[in-house]
Image (cartoon, grey):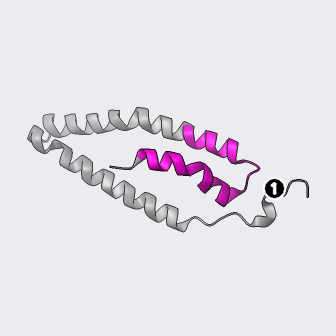
Amino acid sequence: MSMYGGGFATIPAYLRDLFGVMEVGAIHGRLLLAWSAAAILGPQLVNNLRAYQIETLQVPAANAYSTTMYIMAGLLLVGFVCNFCIRPVNPKYHFKGKS
């Protein structure tokens, strides 16, 4: 649903375009750490939400993932808007190297 592989392949180039080459490794490392934390916590949160809906709200099990999918679609929309609002760092702050 979120095209995980495509994002994983393009992130280094995207970070380089935004921040230059000087700190891409450190930024990419932090991004992968956050991505890994989301990969661990995300399924647990989805499962807990589904269990809550079934046990507490008496939602039929076949419909319990509907709310989760709407939440994920909303989060993808929020991510799109946030990504659209990002502006590159001024090139004067990019690493020039030896010329």
| Residue displayed at 42% across by 36% down | 39
Residue 70 rendering spot, x and y as whole percentages: 26, 54
Above or below: residue 17 compared with residue 43: below
30 part of magenta stretch = yes
Region of the chain picked out in magenta, as a range = 4-32
15 part of magenta stretch = yes
- Which of 61 and 6 lies nearest the eye of the viewer? 6
| Residue displayed at 51% across by 61% down | 83
Callout 1, which amino acid? Phe
Residue 96 rendering spot, x and y as whole percentages: 84, 58
Q: Which residue position is annotated with label 1? A: 95
Q: Is residue 54 left or right of residue 19?
A: left
SS category of the residue bearing label 1:
loop
Whether residue 58 can be seen here:
no
- Which of 63 and 9 lies nearest the eye of the viewer? 9
Above or below: residue 96 compared with residue 61: below
Residue 62 rendering spot, x and y as whole percentages: 10, 41
| Residue displayed at 65% across by 60% down | 18
Q: Is residue 53 left or right of residue 43?
A: left
Crowd band around label 1 with a 10 angstrom C-alpha radius: few (<14), some (14–19), many (20+): few
Residue 58 rendering spot, x and y as whole percentages: 9, 40
| Residue displayed at 72% across by 56% down | 20
Please identify the quarter of the rendering in which residue 14 is found. bottom right
Quarter of the picture holding the C terminus:
bottom right
Q: Is residue 26 left or right of residue 42?
A: right
Above or below: residue 47 compared with residue 85: above
Q: Main secondary structure of the magenta part?
A: helix
Q: Is residue 27 left or right of residue 7?
A: right
Please identify the quarter of the rendering in which residue 74 is found. bottom left
